[in-house]
Amino acid sequence: MVVIDLKNKNALITGASRGIGAAIAYKLAQAGANVVINYNQNQQPASELANKIKSDFNITPLLFKANISNLQEVKQMKEFIHSNLGKIDILINNTGINKDKLLRNLTDEEWLDVINVNLNGVFYVTREFIGDMIEKRYGRIINISSIVALSGSAGQTNYCASKAGIIGFSKALAREYAKRNITVNVVAPGYIETDMTNKLPEKIKESIINSIPLGRTGKPEDVANLVVFLASDLASYITGEVINISGGLYM
Ligand SMILES: NC(=O)c1ccc[n+]([C@@H]2O[C@H](COP(=O)([O-])OP(=O)(O)OC[C@H]3O[C@@H](n4cnc5c(N)ncnc54)[C@H](OP(=O)(O)O)[C@@H]3O)[C@@H](O)[C@H]2O)c1
């Protein structure tokens, strides 16, 4: 039997109060990791997740409210984690937002908000924690992009640009730190059932679902299973990859 054991590993998951991030935090804790749950606004679901992890696995997660597009808040999160847990081994850059509109109507603010959270946020968090992994000569960085970074998606120029940026960023980073035993990979989900996809108009949902070869939408747990694998020793020879998880929607 293959067992994934992440005991004594410290993992930070950004945007882990809900959706995919929450499932990743839960499954990393299930594998034994000490998890840090970052969130931006919704403390209640973040606390509920922490309580569930504590009661199911006897691991007490740290919670930290930080807007990852604000460098000062990211630095405060680093100080808090270093004082209360120690250095990070596993970083999951999961946070992402979308503000969809056709390009001619897209405002500067909608462009910048998405780039600032989805791309600049990944830069800030990764730069602040890469030193932990360099010192440990061990690290796993998993960045959550999207299949639309590869396929494009009308009404999502800002989102697609940010998610494609994550892919270039990750490949460059994988080359920079491979010799330090730090792997960097990208997970690109398709249609996963979360608040982000819930708000899509019914007609669009229906047409996407009809084009998924496996005939169903993805669950946050589907993505979390892949992330746990990439965070484990089973994936120690995988770096610089983009792995789609979309039920065949993109192949
Ligand atoms: N769902 C999909 O079908 C799908 C497909 C492809 C890729 N993705 C990507 O997967 C990732 C997770 O998506 P999801 O669907 O789980 O999203 P979601 O349900 O909307 O959850 C977003 C999470 O990000 C947090 N967050 C938002 N802005 C933040 C900020 N400025 N700083 C820190 N945290 C922030 C939220 O915290 P609060 O609760 O505090 O607001 C929440 O925990 C995203 O990167 C998304 O782009 C999703």
Image (cartoon, helix red, strand yellow):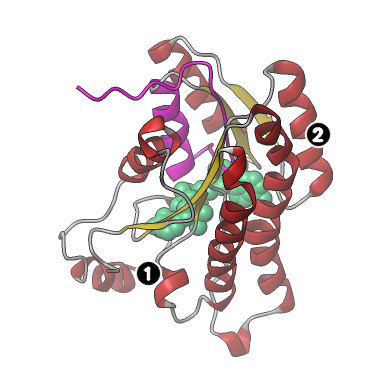
95 displayed left or right of 234: right
Q: Position of residue 112 (x, y in %)?
A: 71, 69
Q: Position of residue 114 (x, y in %)?
A: 64, 65
**Residue identified by numbered label 1:** 201
55 or 148: which is nearer to us? 148
41 displayed left or right of 229: right
Q: Give the magenta range.
A: 1-30
240 or 51: which is nearer to us? 240
Tell me where residue 66 sits by quadrant.
top right
At 58% from the left and 32% from the top, the residue drawn is 138
**Residue identified by numbered label 2:** 76
Q: Amino acid at mark 1?
A: Pro
Q: Is mark 2 within 8 Å of ligand 1?
A: no
- Residue 166 seen: yes
Q: Amino acid at mark 2?
A: Gln
At 42% from the left and 72% from the top, the residue drawn is 150
At 25% from the left and 69% from the top, the residue drawn is 206
Q: Position of residue 23 (x, y in %)?
A: 41, 36
Residue farthest along the bottom direction in this orientation = 104
Q: Mark 2, mark 1: which one is toward the viewer?
A: 2
